[in-house]
Image (spheres, rainbow, N blue to C red):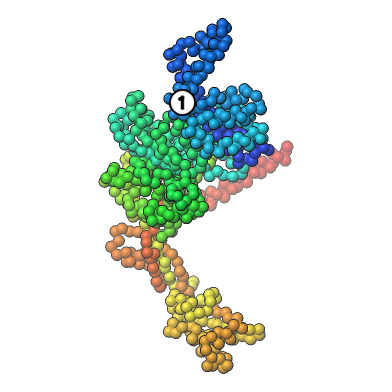
Amino acid sequence: MLQKERLDNLANEIWKGAISLRSKFKAREYSAIILPMIMIRRIECVLEARRKEYKEEIIKQDSSLSDENIETLQESDPEAAKEKRATLLKRIKVTEQAESDFYNTTTWTLQKILEESATQVAANFREYLNGFSDNIDDIIEKFDYRNMVGKMAKAHRLASIIRLVAEEDFGPDKLSNLEMGYVYEHLLQKFSEDDAKDTGEHFTPREIIRIMVDLLEIDFDPESATESISIYDPACGTGGMLSVAKEHLVDKATSDEGKAKTEDLVILSGQEYLPQNYAVCKADMLLKGDTDSNITLGNSLIPDIESIQEDGDKHSSYQFDYMISNPPFGVNWGDYKDEALKLSSSRYRAGTPDVGDGALLFLLTMIEKMKSQEEGGSRISILFNGSPLSNGDALQGESEIRRFILEQDLLDTIVMLPDQMFYNTGIYTYIWVLNNNKPVHKKDQVLIINARDQFEKEPKSFGNKRNRITDTHRTWINDQYEAWEENEFCKKFHVTDFAFHKVNVVYWQENEKGEQEWITEEFDVKLTSQNVKKRFDLYGDFTLFVNLSKGKESYNFEIEYDGEQGFDPIFRELLKDEFPQLKGQKVGQINKFLEDYTITATFHHRNYIEDTEYIAFDRNAEDKDAYINEFLSREIDYEIITWQEVEQLGYEILPNKYFYKYVEPTSSDTLIQEFWELEEQAEELLQEIREL
């Protein structure tokens, strides 16, 4: 269990140090200053621990290099002792570069930099940064930290920022990847609050990740495995989901050999869009020794091709056994829409959602990377807010994507989670589980698990995170999933149960006496044969009232329109009767005559109402049209003139509706009684105030 109070205190202490940046930097720059320094210290902590191990091994081989022997030598021959120290340090550095998957060629540490002359801090720190191996240098570059060092030095704040972390133990043994993620998220929240902006980041709590990993049902036995498995996250952030997935499998190992196998055979891949998040993830993978992981920087939703300047999907040619992700909620993809649509005939052939929320694009990206059934298939666990469930009407992108997923029988289960589970938001969320190789008993079926009540209150709120899911709740969810049976909290649906007919209906409105209504209203479009015919096609015959006015002149025309002729020739004949000078004139001359007049019109027609009905699809209906007719006749009390179904079924998933339970409202008598009781309490309080 995460010790949130300890992490909260740690983040707050770091935040207090960030206050020294006020007046020198804008609040939005705090994260770009503080977080990379934390990561550099985290890397240094690992290197310091390794250097101790290297030192012990070297002294075992040459005892003359031990601290005791060098101290003894110091008394008799200081120069020789100095040479011994230099030899030991050199051998440690050589070993570090030869055996460690990352290193620093300098002898600097953050603490040593502070111990030197204050005027040399910037120069020594730059030398220290330049001494890192290429893989660490890539992380520093993604933070764009060398540029920021110059700004900190110019503002005389570099030494104070180094001092903030120089003695902290940020090593993985003291602060796990998940704990580092909490601190990171806490600081991001504080930085964004100070800048009055929301980062849009939603760090995924460990307990939710563990549920998602459970639902993946990863088929891997650490003790007997001989083949590797792959796990992928297209929006990996700081790497928490991938780390927990692998930790889950390592924890299943019962021997050191099993743990070693898991480390070697479970291959992690991920991509992150934000350089800062990428740098944290990449660094943590290195710190844990996960050198086989393939973490890349770029936009997973667009192709990685030369014609696009931005880095795209670096994993486009790969397929994975398991995929897990919490993509950004409500991510706007309008800025790279043109680039994403280059995949509209392949990855996004099912459709594309509204540019205001690209969450479903991440799911389509993962679906494209599923292995075929012949290769064993793939499983996906993805976390969404409520938007992907029901946004979009029939034929719109979101509905079409859901239709594709359901008609391909990819959706396995949806788990409804409690609210207030996230640090930065209190919204309800949903885990979607997809599987393109379902067992027979799940074919064409979807299970929805209502786990809304599976939580307990946090002893202390962590931002907006006021609820937590314990191991007991997690086990309950997993048991429901494994049983895959209906009960009070679980419902099974056929994939077509989420489908609906969208039907456009025209019916004749009646008045309060039950009589079919006729109404007169403005003809609100240009008065042309085409527009009048459109009205006729909808309303049938009607009466048209046309007025010509110019100054004090006003002429009225009444036309009983039956659709036999076009409006224009009828109106021209009426004009010729009213204005003899128009007789024998051509159409162009009559139109020119009308330019001097203002033309307005109203029309008297049947009060037809155009409406849209959403009708649940019934896979057992033998005659679709008869089924729709029966529904419309039952639901609409008026004469139906016409109806037309939209050409494609729509799909939506409404978990809250499926588990809705009617609760009778409080009676008016009870409410009145409660009101008077409150009134009495208020009067008593006022009386106490008067007596003060």
Return the residue at label 1: 97
Q: Is residue 392 left or right of residue 597?
A: left
Q: Secondary structure at mark 1?
A: helix
Q: Is residue 381 above or below residue 44?
A: below
**Residue 435 image position (x, y, % from top left):** 33, 45
Q: Quadrant of residue 463?
A: top right
Q: Residue at image x 35%, y 65%?
A: 628
Please rate how many residues cluster around mark 1, counting C-alpha atoms within 10 Å: few if below 14, some from 14 to 19, many from 20.
Answer: some
On the question of residue 215 being in view, the answer is: no
Quadrant for the C terminus in the image: top right
Q: Residue at x 49, y 39 (%)?
A: 278
- The image quadrant that residue 642 belongs to is bottom left
Q: Residue furthest top?
A: 76
Question: Does 81 sit left or right of 418 as displayed?
Answer: right
Against 482, is 547 above or below?
A: below
Residue at point 47% right, 55% down? 338
Which residue type carries mark 1? Gln
Please state the horizontal and vertical placement of residue 126, each as a whole percent of the image. Answer: 58, 31
**Does residue 625 appear in the picture of this structure?**
yes
Residue 395 x/y as whole percent: 41, 60
Q: Nearer the viewer, residue 64 or 579?
A: 64
Q: Residue at x 52, y 39 (%)?
A: 142
Image coordinates of residue 471 in percent, x first then y, are 41, 33
Which of the pair 594/160 is nearer the observer?
160
